[in-house]
Amino acid sequence: MEIAKKITLLFAILSAIIISLLSGFVWYFSNDFAFEDFYKRLEARVNIAAQIKLYEDGNNKVYAKMRNQYLERLPSEKEYIIEAGKPTNKLDRELPASFYNRINAGYVARYRVENHFYAGKFFKNPNKGYIVIVSANDPFGFRELKDLQRILIIGFFLSVILSFVVGWKFSNYMLMPLRNIIKSVKKIKAENLHLRLDVKKGNDEMSQLAQTFNNMLNRLETAFETQNNFISNASHELRTPLTIISGEVELAMKTIEDTAKQEKALAKIKDEAERLEHILTSLLGLAQSGFNGKNQPWEEVRMDELLWEIKESVNQVHPNSQIEIDFTKLPDDDELLTLRVNKNLIKLAISNIVNNACKYSNENLVSISIESNANMLSIAVTDRGIGIPQTDIQHIFEPFYRASNTNDFKGYGVGLPLSLNIIRLHRGSIAIKSQEGVGTEIKVLLPTKS
């Protein structure tokens, strides 16, 4: 069932419940008020009849005259005066025992059969006790209640129909922006990911939904572009060493008698094979860093201790490098240094950054500082190396991209993209600041709260 139909049906059901409760409320109190008024009129006649018929009073004739002149006679009005303890055969119908029990208890008794009402009360004169009962019809009040009942029933069905129509119009009006979003989203395909939804001004749910779709489309477009660039660059990077290897094999086959050329060709083949292996390993790392992390081991890690491990591992690769760790900005609370991370991946990410700093700093000092506050832990790696040209900074996190001033250094352009993937997996980010010929600072930001 469509949402509009569900909303309309729910709106109609709720309206029907509310209207039925209101109608019942009106009917109950109208019914109670009408009956209460008529019963009081009967009770007044009970008291007057008892006064005139049972008590010796010089004013009884005056009471009777006023009764006849000023007190209207009710339809089918009858008076019954029954001696206590005697049979009640003179009544037009047999009344329930509860009616007489209430009279005997000293209360005014009431009874109704459709629109025929009875009121009775016990009186005692100096000689005996009597039960005085007055009965009458109330055709006017009963007819008014019947008319009210009919009006309420007709009003109920008309209100439900009206609420259904209003609910249908209302649901269509409210869901129109959602239908427009659905229509716009259906037009967006892989070929036109640049299209975006119109976001209306305001902060309502529809605007938030449209903005959320646009944010998702931004990520998808970026992912598609990254994928296309990745495939293009990977194909090129893989094809280059394979082409060299193939050429060197042909050269080695042609120079069977020249041992020196064969050895040179085989050495070249070995280098390119190692390069190819390194590229494939990097590609695998990039692919693995894109997983969701649910099936990987996550643990509590002291990040300051992890920096010492990273320093030792980088020193093995760059034994002449100078790495200094600055702990002057450590927080007083040691718990702020402990993060829940995948230790192997986070170590790989930061190691890649430190390795790059050592490689491109020509053995100058590389400084690592760690700082933490209540919400974020930052690790800054600063070198005094060749720096990055401003035109290249925006591309350095693209796979296989290398800055224009790195031709004298061996590399494949996968270290920083891999680090960025890993940091993003940990809900963090990377900031970079560099000046060509001066140095580079890369700051890793990781949230301290999981």
Image: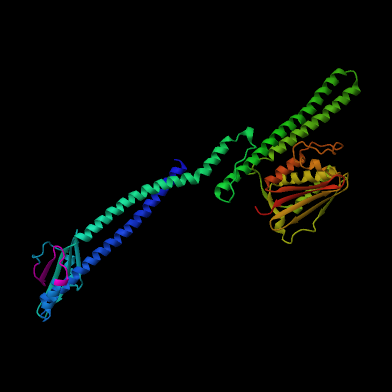
Left or right: residue 443 compared with residue 2: right
Residue 330: give x, y in percent of width and height. 76, 58
Left or right: residue 54 compared with residue 423: left
> Does the magenta-highlighted stretch encompass residue 194?
no
Residue 259: give x, y in percent of width and height. 90, 22
- Residue at far front of view: 69
Residue 274: give x, y in percent of width and height. 80, 32
Residue 350: give x, y in percent of width and height. 76, 46
Q: Residue at x 24, y 66 (%)?
A: 36
Q: Can you say whether 178 is above or below 77 in the image?
A: above
- Number of dots carrying numbers: 0
Q: What's the colour scheme?
A: rainbow
Q: Nearer the viewer, residue 367 or 96?
A: 96
Left or right: residue 372 compared with residue 40: right
Q: Residue at x 62, y 42 (%)?
A: 214
Quadrant that contains the N terminus? top left
Q: Residue at x 64, y 36 (%)?
A: 193
Q: Quadrant of residue 329?
A: bottom right
Q: Nearer the viewer, residue 49 or 169?
A: 169
Q: Residue at x 55, y 41 (%)?
A: 181
> Does the magenta-highlighted stretch encompass residue 71?
yes
Q: Can you say whether 243 is above or below 400 in the image?
A: above
What are the residue bounds of the magenta stretch? 69-87
Left or right: residue 129 compared with residue 337: left
Q: Nearer the viewer, residue 430 or 93?
A: 93
